[in-house]
């Protein structure tokens, strides 16, 4: 038996013994995923049990090195783990910005002390992170950010405002872009710092989204303190780290476009029925769904291929913009189709009959996909310059 086959058998047995039955169900919503943190929101007690068991083996971050709380698996083993989890319908044990965004950036740019301090806490779901990038006058033009960090010897004092900070009111720590120097070009003088949100100088104010939920905040820093030991990379050179992290964020957001388990076609057949020849009884919708499903399958296959080709943990670089652009536009198409398939019943906003507006709220939320992590227009600019090498107009 090959080593990989042996690993598969051991993994299968371990998952059978350790994955609670309740965690073998697909997550129903973002809130239904386990995000960890000092005060975790626990919908079902098994979420924490499952997370702790997986973290014990390093399998919340299977490919991170063992010394940082990871599983130390190679690409082949990580693939087997995800196949075996899919086989029993096991959900991911922990989902966090620490795993998908900060972790890769720290692995690449963090000091040894920073890796040892922060990565294991991310892997075990002990600390929940948020992303302090956007400001009221610095969204697409992120390098115009003005939040100021003043040098006070062994620490910085931070003043300014961030906006659209997802889950800032629930996060324990923030990875934050601040201006430490104003004298050069706008891309210089930006620093990447980490600090605790639980301190007197930090205030968050939730903002309501069009979908009715309030997942993000205005975030205010009024003499907030960040230790210099938590400056990642060199002072004033944070822009490179910021961009690297964004490629991982975009890769994560692009996965929203992957083909869903229950296809829109299946849902349409259940909702609308079939004609005499067994085809969906609405020819216009049939054509739109078929085109969407072909595009989603091709996208998923391309993501799988490119993911296999990318060096483990290194990500896709600027090409992540292609996937971010296409994946989010696809996800918006899927949500449009869900509305069309559901008809009147998909438009309800509240009440059991409408599943508390799940379809309409998801449809509205999907509009933000092509804005968060950089808008579609900005991705097209990046693709033209950095992937295709086209000249500036
Ligand atoms: C759901 C959601 C969650 C978010 N979470 C976070 C978070 O956790 N942390 C965080 O820091 N930020 C977060 N953001 C903010 C997000 O990164 C910004 O909204 C985004 O970068 C766009 O910036 P802006 O909103 O200021 O729009 P603007 O930059 O003002 O853009 C307005 C419009 O102008 C267009 N535009 C601007 N510049 C150009 C250009 N050069 N070429 C072509 N078109 C252009 C844009 O495409 C857009 O259509 C989140 C946003 C959303 C919607």
Image (tube, helix red, strand yellow):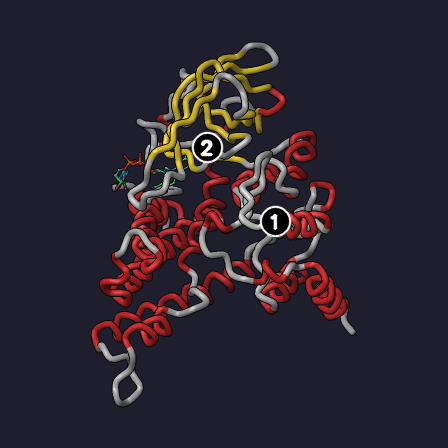
Q: Report crowding for label 1: few under 14, some 14 to 19, many 20 or more residues within 10 A (C-alpha).
A: few
The residue depicted at 64 percent of the width and 34 percent of the height is: 118
Residue at (35% x, 71% y) in the render = 267
Q: Ligand 1 quadrant? A: top left
Residue 168 is marked as 2
Q: For this rendering, which residue is in front, 51 or 187?
A: 51
Q: Where does residue 377 sit, x and y in percent of width and height?
A: 29, 45
Q: In the rendered image of this protein, does residue 111 appear above or below residue 50? A: above
Quarter occupied by the C terminus: top left
* Residue at 47 percent of width and 47 percent of height: 31
Structural crowding at the residue carrying mark 2, measured as other residues with C-alpha within 10 Å and reported as few (<14), some (14–19) or many (≥20): many
Is residue 384 visible in the rendered image? The answer is no
Pinpoint residue 379: horizontal percent, then vertical percent: 35, 46
Q: As drawn, which residue projects farthest toward the front?
A: 352
**Which numbered disc, 2 or 1, marks the residue that appears first in the sequence?**
1
Q: Position of residue 223 (x, y in %)?
A: 47, 13
Label 2 CB-ligand 1 distance < 8 A: yes
Q: Quadrant of the N terminus?
A: bottom right
Label 1 residue SS: helix
Disc 2 versus disc 1: nearer the observer = 1
Which x, y percent locates residue 280? 28, 79
Disc 2 to disc 1, C-alpha distance: 24 Å
Q: Name the mark on residue 137.
A: none
| Quadrant hosting residue 136 | top left
Which residue is under mark 1?
45
Q: Are marks 2 and 1 in contact (CB under 8 Å)?
A: no
In this view of the protein, can residue 162 be seen by the observer?
yes
Above/below status of 363 relative to 7 = above
The answer to whether residue 334 is above or below residue 133 is below
Judge left or right: residue 326 versus residue 130: left
């Amino acid at each position: 038996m090959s080593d990989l086959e042996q690993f598969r058998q051991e993994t299968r047995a371990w998952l059978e013994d350790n994955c609670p039955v309740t965690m073998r169900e697909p997550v129903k919503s973002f809130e239904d995923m386990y995000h960890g943190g000092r005060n975790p929101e626990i919908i079902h007690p098994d979420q924490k049990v499952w997370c702790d068991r997986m973290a014990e083996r390093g399998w919340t971050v299977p490919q991170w090195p063992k010394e940082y709380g990871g599983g130390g698996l190679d690409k082949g083993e990580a693939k087997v783990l995800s196949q075996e989890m899919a086989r029993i319908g096991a959900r991911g044990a922990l989902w966090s910005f620490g795993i998908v965004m900060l972790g890769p950036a720290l692995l690449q740019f963090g000091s040894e002390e920073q890796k040892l301090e922060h990565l294991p806490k991310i892997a075990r779901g002990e600390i929940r992170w948020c992303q302090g990038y956007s400001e009221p006058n610095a969204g697409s033009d992120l390098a115009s950010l003005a939040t100021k960090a003043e040098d006070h010897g062994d620490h910085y004092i931070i003043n300014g405002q961030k906006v659209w900070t997802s889950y800032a009111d629930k996060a324990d720590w923030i990875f934050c872009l601040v201006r430490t120097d104003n004298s050069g070009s706008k891309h210089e003088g930006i620093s990447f710092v980490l600090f605790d949100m639980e301190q007197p100088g930090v205030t968050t104010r939730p903002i309501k989204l069009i979908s009715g939920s309030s997942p993000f905040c205005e975030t205010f820093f009024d003499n907030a303190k960040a230790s210099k030991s938590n400056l990642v990379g060199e002072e004033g050179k944070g822009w490179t780290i910021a961009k690297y992290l964004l490629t991982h964020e975009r890769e994560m957001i692009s996965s929203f476009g992957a083909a869903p388990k229950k296809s829109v076609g299946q849902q349409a057949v259940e909702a609308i029925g079939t004609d005499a020849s067994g085809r969906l009884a609405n020819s216009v919708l049939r054509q739109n769904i078929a085109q969407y499903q072909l595009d989603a399958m091709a996208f998923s296959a391309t993501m799988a291929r490119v993911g296999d080709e990318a060096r483990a943990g290194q990500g896709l670089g600027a090409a992540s913009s292609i996937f971010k652009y296409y994946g989010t536009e696809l996800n918006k198409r899927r949500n449009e189709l869900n509305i069309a398939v559901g008809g009147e019943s998909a438009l309800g906003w509240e009440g059991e009959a409408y599943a508390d507006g799940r379809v309409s709220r998801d449809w509205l939320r999907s509009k933000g996909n092509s804005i968060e992590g950089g808008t579609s227009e900005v991705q097209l600019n990046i693709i033209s310059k950095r992937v295709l090498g086209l000249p500036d107009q």
